[in-house]
Amino acid sequence: MTAPVPAAPSDDAAGGVRGSAGPVPDPTTWPGVDPEWSRDAVVGGRRWHYLDNAASLPAGTTPRGTLLCVHGNPTWSYLWRSVLAAGADAGWRVVAVDQLEMGYSERTGAHHRLADRVRQLGGLTDALGLSGPSWDGLPVVTVGHDWGGVVSMGWAVDHPRELAGLVLTNTAVFQAAGTKVPYLLRLARHRAVHGPATELSPAFLDVTLSLARPPLPADVRAAYKAPYRSVRDRRGIGAFVEDIPVDAAHPSHAELARLAAGVGALGVPALIMWGPKDPVFYERYLRDLLTRLPHADVHRFEGAGHLVVEDADVAGTVVTWLDRRRLGRDASGAPAAARAPGGDRSGPRPAPGPLPTAATAPYRPLYAALLEQAGSAAAAVVAMGAAGPSSLTWAELATRVHHLALGLADSGVRPGDRVSLLIPPGVDLTTALFACLRVGATVVLADAGLGIKGLTRAVRGAAPDHIIGIERALVAARVFGWPGRKFIARPAVAGIEMLPPRTVHSRRRVFGIHGSVPELLVRGASLAAAGTQLPPEPGPDSDAAILFTSGSTGPAKGVVYTHRRLAGMRDVVAATYGLSPERSFVAGFAPFALLGTALGATSATPDMDVTAPATLTAGALADAVAAIDAYAVFASPSALDNVVRTSGDLTEAQRHALGEVRLFLSAGAPISSARLARVTDVMPAADAHTPYGMTEALPLTDISLGQIRAAEADAAAGAVPGAGNGTCVGAPVPGAHVRIVPLDDEGRATGEPTDEAGVTGEVLATAPNLKDRYDRLWATQDHSATWPGWHRTGDVGHLDAAGRLWIEGRVTHVIVTAAGVVTPVQVENDSLAVRGVVRAAAVGVGPIGAQQVVVVVETDPDVHAGARHPATLAPEGLARAVRAAARVPVAAVLRVPEVPTDVRHNSKVERGRLAAWATRMLAGERAGNP
């Protein structure tokens, strides 16, 4: 019954020939498939084809369990070839079925409904010994895609004894009443399109295969199409499309409803992997699945689409997840949960050093200082603008936060809800953020500096329940389909609630606006007067915020902070820089804009475009400093560079104001001592500092200008082992610890963590203000937490004998030459010492192990006449100077009119983009500017 089908000869149809009951498989023509995996079974008089990797498992061993993989429409078991291979390597048996009428299973001519398919799959697994009376006792993890996901969930609901886990990719189990199925499915079901597109031609199949990102290789595409060469072969495709239950009257609706209810009762571990660029299964289906499987681990593969199994490393993620969740049996046959700790090959690795205590001080909520100063008439927040400053006293701010919190709770915002705040830094953002935190909602902070595409990815990925934003943001939310009930923060006119009713209705209907912050404040004031109480305060380990990385090394990642960890950030900043309620500061760097209220210190935001830090002028900074008599200034390197450039326009009063600043921080990207020193000319009394950290943990280390100069002197003199080769970012801040994961000869961080001086590798860190996790990026979080409680930063660096950290670049930017590993930062620092070079990037061109170092420079037009000319090889004199300055051989020097940097900070050089461009350029291709 289950013997392998011998390979059949092939004719004009690649991959098989036609038989009386359907196409005959020829697995020798399927790329990525071991021919021994192709098998068939006859169940109930019907022939099933399936792929089974049992022959690839070591002889005499017991599989850890079985992965039961179910394809959707119009694919077949070939979809799971990578899972079959990865499963075999990990000791898992993988059985991937071809549903009846699909792939190489029998063409019976019958029309199978959803309930039929669920029942048929159960009959097959009974026959194979995966379930039923002949069950082999091995735990089963179902794996499904598209409508195969629905069928696999049906099997899971009906087989609780055998079921050990659930894996889903781009699927759905519920269609809400009143909502339309996705457009492509509606089109495919249309009477004028259905037959011609699904059966009479391969159009539906071709469109589905075209959704792969990147496009499928020709031989893989041919393998997918092989079992669907004739009209008869494709009838199952058309029937599958027709069986989509679009409404309650559809014959399969009752079964779908049964499965939707049953899935919610499954308590087994679950993994959902999603391709966001899917025109078939929208993200609303993911949100629905998470309401039914709230415990599920989720990984969204940004850039992947409907065929996420083809687009991303689904197979590797599955086998890693099985290990982490301790599913399956070990080699002795014992259940994974019963393994001794020492025998768990996937268990946590030993911590590389001391972990910080849970808190360095008693936990105080982020909003504690606001409550403590609720009676103060002193200024709390000041926002500078073209129309003049706007401000609130502590008493006013505390009242507004309390009233808004009451209004939000009354409007339906519940503890645990996600609220996206699309408001520029200032009074409105501060009010909304602290009101949400007090209600127990999780604030989603994705700033406009990500750009519209990045912002759309971030908001959709976080899936907020509510959005509070300025009018421009709500228009974008409507246009780009961002989820969540929408509240306008500050109407563009006197107030939407003040406009004529007809206009109110039309505007709110068009933009989907549920209400406004002014309305919520009024409602909250009324509730406060009536004695209404707020919900209980959120716990310290409840989610508080989702922040986003800059996106300089790929799509911006959501980073989840709990209330305790956010409070840890506040406490670390206060301890490191001596900030207190008596020391006000100006925040020209978005992450610090809200810390003032948390610290109980007056804060001001300067008049600038927060999406473009380099728009901060010296005059705008001085006005913000003067408005609150600021003790400190926080800004990014590009913002401070523009402050220096525009300092000649300062008035005497503005110069005096900046002369009173006692501390300034350059944060967000590396900055050289020379650039930092130039800022001290504008703020001469200020102690210059630059912290090192990232969205996942800010700050981790800190260094002053004087300490940078001392470190550079140590490097030049060779007085301290490990000093030099990179940019010194100082010693860890209070409570933080740093270790290094050494690089191997291929530039990969594979060693065991160490604090030995001079060892280059990936920077590993832990701190009380470390993130809790990445949001809906399970695989990313798993990799980053190889050592539990510690974070793999992705940065490359080393420690010196004085305990200082030197940053050398990013792991992904390491250059592996024939002579060894080269890290980019020191090469860039050397190049920046050449007269006229204002930005530099060192990148690798060529294959790993034989890469050549290429330096890309941007030059000052006042020094080099051709600085703004199209990209080309650098002039001979400039190239010679760069090569002379660099401490490693440089194969080529290229000059560009502008070195690309990240959107948020305008400071982090995009080395990956430049490496790809330099490769094309040096190959003689038409490359243009990077």
Image (tube, grey):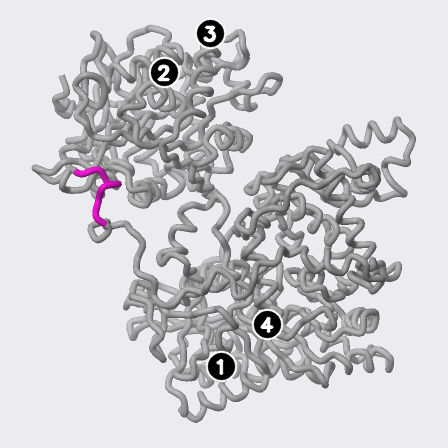
The residue identified by callout 3 is 251
Q: Residue furthest front?
A: 531
Specify the quadrant that holds the C terminus: bottom right
Sequence-wise, the earlier of marks 4 and 1 is 4
Front-lying residue, 899 or 557: 557
Q: How far apart are marks 4 and 1 (CA)?
A: 34 Å
The residue identified by callout 4 is 575
Q: Is residue 364 shown left or right of residue 749?
A: right
Q: Where is residue 596 in the image (x, y as percent from the top left)?
A: 70, 63
Q: Where is residue 2 in the image (x, y as percent from the top left)?
A: 14, 20
Q: Position of residue 207 (x, y in %)?
A: 45, 27
Q: What element carries label 1?
A: helix
- Other-residue count near label 3 (Cα within 10 Å), few / some / many at <14 / 14–19 / ≥20: some
Q: What element carries label 4?
A: helix
Q: Which of marks 4 and 3 is in front?
A: 4
**Magenta-tinted stretch:** 334-340
- Other-residue count near label 4 (Cα within 10 Å), few / some / many at <14 / 14–19 / ≥20: few
Q: Please name the residue shown 53% across and 52% down the image.
A: 559
The residue identified by callout 1 is 830
Q: Please name the residue shown 50% across and 60% down the image.
A: 770
Front-lying residue, 794 or 799: 799
